[in-house]
Amino acid sequence: MDDEEEYVHVAIIENNAYWVIGNVFYQADIVDGEVNKESSRPIDAFKMSSKDLNKMLYILDNLTEGS
């Protein structure tokens, strides 16, 4: 196993954390500077506005850049 496979890239934006595991895009709240794991949830792009979808695509592009 490569060392890189042991890490998850996380983006922190506006008190939310975003990451991808197993081709699923997740979001969680940031509480006191820490990712609140209990609040993690998959992102449902079908329920988003165009503005929010574009924001998520930008985050996703930056998370997966270079992988």
Image (cartoon, rainbow, N blue to C red):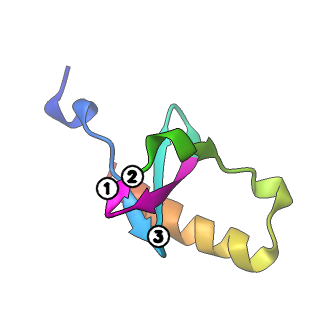
Which residue in the structure is indicated by mark 3? 15
Of the two numbered discs 1 and 2 in the rendering, the one whose residue sits closer to the viewer: 2
Please give the label number shown on residue 35: 2
Disc 1 element: loop
Extreme residue toward the front, this view: 32
* Label 3: few (<14), some (14–19) or many (≥20) C-alpha neighbours in 10 Å: few
Disc 3 residue type (three-letter): Asn
Range shown magenta: 26-34
Q: CA distance from mark 1 to mark 2?
A: 24 Å
Left or right, residue 23 beside residue 64: right
Left or right, residue 7 beside residue 56: left
* Label 2: few (<14), some (14–19) or many (≥20) C-alpha neighbours in 10 Å: some
- Residue at image position (51%, 31%) is 22
Disc 1 residue type (three-letter): Gly
* Label 1: few (<14), some (14–19) or many (≥20) C-alpha neighbours in 10 Å: few
Instruction: Give percent across and percent down for residue 51.
Output: 73, 80
Instruction: Give percent across and percent down for residue 12.
Output: 39, 66
Reply yes or no: does residue 60 show up in magenta.
Answer: no
Of the two numbered discs 3 and 1 in the rendering, the one whose residue sits closer to the viewer: 3
Disc 2 element: strand
- Residue at image position (39%, 52%) is 35
Which residue in the structure is indicated by mark 1? 66
Residue situated in front as seen by the camera: 23 or 31: 31
Residue situated in front as seen by the camera: 55 or 12: 12
